[in-house]
Amino acid sequence: MTTARDVTAAIAKEGKYLTFALGREEYGLEILSVREIIGLMDITGVPQVPKYVKGVINLRGKVIPVIDLRLKFEMPSVDYTNETCIIVLNIQDVLIGILVDRVCEVLDIAETDIEPPPTFGTVTAINLIKGMGKIDGKVKILLNIEKILTEDLSIAAKIS
């Protein structure tokens, strides 16, 4: 069970965030979890995994599972473009790729520009969002990517 203390501990802190887009929405994740950004490459399907797990890639001899973040967030699927890319993350010493529509930029977000996540009525939703970054009149949703991918890390460990 998640407590209010857990939610408070998950609030975003100032620092550098890699921002990316899924459709018209822009999201951010702490740059420290990003290993590298690569263009779309051949993804080998893996049977009997959730639909949002697109498969695995071979990146310089390492097998890395790839998750389509659109499908993970229950957004409609779209055709991949030349801007579609894979952000390779290192979470709990497990490499995992997330497929995004496009990478936007790296932002240095000050603490004063981060609001706590809005209340959506469930602690689960709040846990997945660390905060809301206010940049140039726009809002970037700062994700708690580790919480979002928690269940997928065990899948990733088995696949890779």
Image (tube, helix red, strand yellow):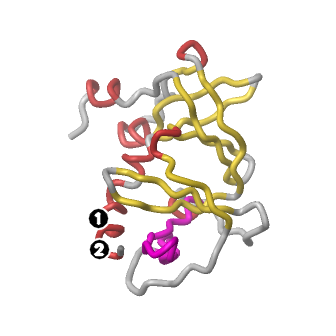
Q: Secondary structure at mark 1?
A: helix
| Magenta span of residues | 51-70
Q: Residue at 40% x, 55% y: name it.
A: 149
The image shows residue 59 at horizontal and vertical percentages of 52, 71
> What secondary structure prevails in the magenta region?
strand
Please give the name of the residue rendered at 62% of the width and 26% of the height, measured from the top-left corner: 108
Q: Nearer the viewer, residue 37 or 115?
A: 37
For disc 2, the marked residue is: 158
**In the image, residue 127 above or below residue 53:** above
Q: Which residue has dot 1 on it?
A: 154
Spot occupied by residue 111 in the image (x, y as percentages of width and height): 53, 16
Q: Is residue 155 above or below residue 74?
A: below
> Is residue 57 highlighted in magenta?
yes
On the image, the x and y values in percent for residue 146 come to 38, 47
Dot 1, crowdedness within 10 Å: few (<14), some or many (≥20)?
few
Quadrant in which residue 79 is drawn: bottom right
The quadrant of the image that shows the C terminus is bottom left
Instruction: Name above or below for residue 117 compared with residue 67.
Output: above
Residue furthest to the front: 60
Seen as rendered, the residue at the extreme left is 1
Identity of the amino acid at label 2? Lys
Farthest residue, direction top: 112
Q: Which mark is residue 35?
A: none
Which amino acid type corresponds to the residue marked 1 in the rendered image?
Ser
Q: Determine whether the residue tagged by mark 2 lies in a helix, strand or loop.
A: helix
> Looking at the picture, how far across and down is residue 158, in whole percent?
29, 74
At 51% from the left and 48% from the top, the residue drawn is 34
| Towards the viewer: 16 or 5 | 16
Asked if the residue under mark 1 is in contact with the one under mark 2, i.e. CB atoms within 8 Å, the reply is yes
Question: Where the N terminus falls, by quadrant?
Answer: top left
Q: Residues within 10 Å of mark 2 (few under 14, many from 20)?
A: few
Q: Residue 130 lies in magenta, yes or no? A: no
